[in-house]
Image: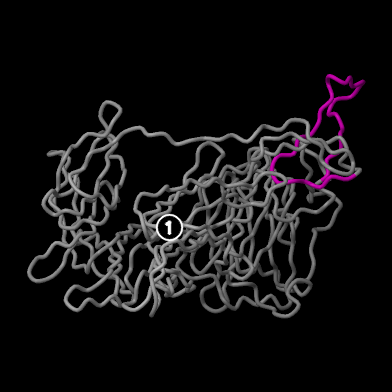
Amino acid sequence: MVQSKGSRGLRLASAVAAPLNFPASQIFTNCYYFPSEFSLVATVKIQTLRQKTNEYIFSVVREGSDSLLLGLRVSENRLHFLTTSPGPGGRSRMTFKDVGLDNNRWHTVVLAVTGPYATLTVDCGLPLELKQVQSFPSHLSTRGSRFFVGSRGRWRGRFSGLLRQLVLLPGSDATPRLCPSPDPALTELSIPQVLKTTPFQPDQQGPVYTYEAEARVTVGDRPPCSRPEQGQLWFNAQGKGLFICDGLSWRTLLQSKQRLDYVEDYQDLYTRSETLDVEVFSIPSEGLFMAAANKDSRSGSGIYRWTNASFQLYQNISTQEARSWKHFTIDDKIFLVVAANFREAGSERSVIYQWHRRRRRFVRYQTLETHTAQDWEAFRIHNHSFLVVANHRRERDSNHNIHSVIYRWNPDTKLFEVNQTLLTSGAYDWEFFTVGPYHFLVVANTFDGRTTIISSTIYIWLDGSFQTFQSIQTVGATDWEPFQIDGRFFLAVANSQKIPDRGTSVYSINSTVYELNALTQTFIRFQDILTHSALDWEFFTIGDEKFLVVANSHDGSSYSLNSVVYRWQGYEGTTPGLT
């Protein structure tokens, strides 16, 4: 055990010690197959490696034949993941380049493997994703194999660095459990207790005076406080407090008072009709813009540009009953798509506009058939661009139970083409979000022709299409808002009105925040918030503070209502939630 830069790790390479290993049957007691989806988490400190030097952090080796089944190997500025598939596929290797692990500093890496994709996250940074030709084998037998930690069972290739953490997590991406973190290079999922406690020991020899003493300050979640931790300090970054352990409990040294922040009026913007949505976006070398979706067809919709510290009308675009705008880019092309009801050749259509660089205006690019479109969502999966429309109601028969359409960009024709259709009921909003390597779409279903008490559906991307992941009962859902706080994933739904089969409508009802449960792999109810015909949620941050704001529209008697900004309360001594 070696302490370096304030943290402990194990040095496994030695001229005497045998490689650390154990039979695979100690882990896989009920099933011999290695998980087909998993994460590997490792915290390491590696000195600079010479060219052509390869060292194994972890490996699984077949006993007797010395055949490598699986290995995680590091070399100069690279990380390699090796597998040997059963059958004719043979050995495969995925190499992550320019990862910068061998710089004599602590790093925590998360390698998440699912199907043909492997995603690497270093120190909670941006994930790097690689795709191999073949998926990770679903039936990789570990029968008669051994796990080696810090080697592959040979003297050559033994890991010369320090190892602080090594975790195999089946069936899940470990990144949300670790990130974000106040100390991403040393973020912990499971670390031996002996490596956690750091004694107060000066690095230098000789007398130590009080003004030269070093005290370790822990940052992040509340650490344990007992006699061994007596005198240690803990800084609560969220609660802005400094605490000292007295051997039994944490005592307050400094604690900031809770601040009250307010949003003030900045600019009143005149629009030519009732505006149902605004979309703020930027264009390189041009500046900040805002598109307003105006309901009145006679006035069209306005594009505003940020000029002299305020938004000024820049371009007016002819629209019909515009509901919303969505900005997106494909390569170097800039687009705006409007959810509107253009009536052309006996059908309803929405229009995609492209930014014309020479004319410095948006021009019509493509029209797509829609049905009382309420919303567009643009997203990318594996370098492919998609658009999905929320079709609310078919006009000719007033049917709300119709298909909403996912379009995919064809790089050859430079047009969007139908990729998939999903049955929806009065669809009002689509939201795309990712959790680790998984991609999700969630639809807000509002009305099925009889009632607003219906299910809205979360879809997951599997095998090249979206498939049902979970259905949640909603009440006139008009919006979903995905957001993340301290590695926890949430979904907030805006419920607008309760219209039962029989009876009167109710507008003051609960909207709900759901949290993704890693164990059940479902979204579960986290918090109910009373809203008044809520139409929209927006999540935003200011510094370390997290906020969620709701747009209230009607309480059954008045449209003049307060909309509310909620603050995330997760300080020491409080129950986490929005207040």
Q: Is residue 38 left or right of residue 463?
A: right
Q: Secondary structure at mark 1?
A: strand
Residue at x 19%, y 37% (from the top left corner): 313
Q: Residue at x 66, y 33 (%)?
A: 257
* Residue 209 magenta-highlighted: yes
Residue 49 can be seen in this image: no
Q: Position of residue 285 (x, y in %)?
A: 26, 33
Image: magenta residue range: 197-226
Q: Is residue 561 left or right of residue 140?
A: left
Given residues 544 and 19, the one toward you in this image is 544
Residue 311 in the figure: left or right of residue 159: left
Rendered residue at 61%/62% (across/down): 39
Find residue 120 and report its image quarter.
bottom right
Q: Is residue 560 above or below residue 382?
A: above
Instruction: Provide the residue designation for mark 1.
Output: 532
Q: Position of residue 113 (x, y in %)?
A: 56, 64
- In the rendered image, the vertical position of residue 57 relative to residue 185, given as above or below: below
Please rate how many residues cluster around mark 1, counting C-alpha atoms within 10 Å: few if below 14, some from 14 to 19, many from 20. many
Q: Residue 166 appears at what percent x and percent y? A: 71, 56
On the rendered structure, is 100 left or right of 301? right
